[in-house]
Amino acid sequence: MTAGAAAIRVVVADDHQVVRSGYAALLDTQSDFTVVGTASDGAEAVRICRESHPDVVLMDVRMPEMDGIEATRRLLGDDRRDDATGGALPRVLVLTTFDLDEYVYDALRAGASGFLLKDVTAERLFDAVRVVASGQALLAPSVTRRLISEFAQLRPKQDAASKTALSALTPRETQVLRLVAEGLSNPEIAARLVVTEETVKTHVSRVLGKLGLRDRTQAVVAAYESGLVVPGDNAR
């Protein structure tokens, strides 16, 4: 961890005690992580998050009482900011057994920033938490796009208000959104458009702001569900 940098605060939510304890123990081996709480269901996860203000939540998508979808929705859906700290909302990383899981898609629609298979390696887990905490990249772009494109076809398109928001984008911002939806990183977009990476960051920030989105994952969902990107196009 860089000197002076704050550790990434993590909450682990899973209804299986062995899984929950295992993730927490793994994360605690890294100097740049601090596990600030664990939860056995969605309701407990919401309560602990509102008390401990984590940066990242590892959220099992299927739990009794309240599942990870509803917990994510309650944490992120109203875009609440904590009155006591003024801090940003946590980023949710969904845990699942199957990558093409409609529950995971619903969690992404509710605001989750990415997902991991439960058999993930320790190093992949660590990398994913860091990526999600930074908010600068799309986690596993090709897999995320495949999941979103698979289920976006089954869901109704966004309403007129959402399409109006898309129409507020400039042609360049629309182009950048399409490239984000392809799973390209900022350096890759910069190379494709022959502009600086800083210019791309500015465009991405404006796209997220105009559409009221939290991160790149929500931008991909919006691009598919609005019809801006058609499932099957530009497959990578």
Image (tube, rainbow, N blue to C red):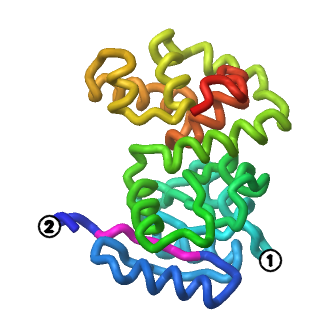
Is residue 60 shown left or right of residue 172?
Answer: right
Question: How many numbered circles are shown?
Answer: 2
Q: Main secondary structure of the magenta part?
A: strand
Graded by Cα atoms within 10 Å as few (under 14), some (14 to 19) or many (20 or more), the crowding at tag 2 reads few
Measure how far apart labels 2 and 1 are at the Cα level: 41 Å
**Residue at the image point whose x is 29% and y is 28% from the top:** 197
Q: Position of residue 25 (x, y in %)?
A: 45, 86
Q: Mark 2 belongs to which amino acid? A: Ala
Q: Image quadrant of residue 93?
A: bottom right
* Amino acid type for the residue under numbered disc 1: Pro
The label number, if any, that marks residue 111 in the structure image:
none
For the C terminus, the quadrant is top right
Magenta region: 7-12
Q: Is residue 8 one of those drawn in magenta? A: yes
Instruction: Using the image, determine if residue 23 lies above or below residue 227.
Output: below
- Give the residue pinned by disc 1: 64
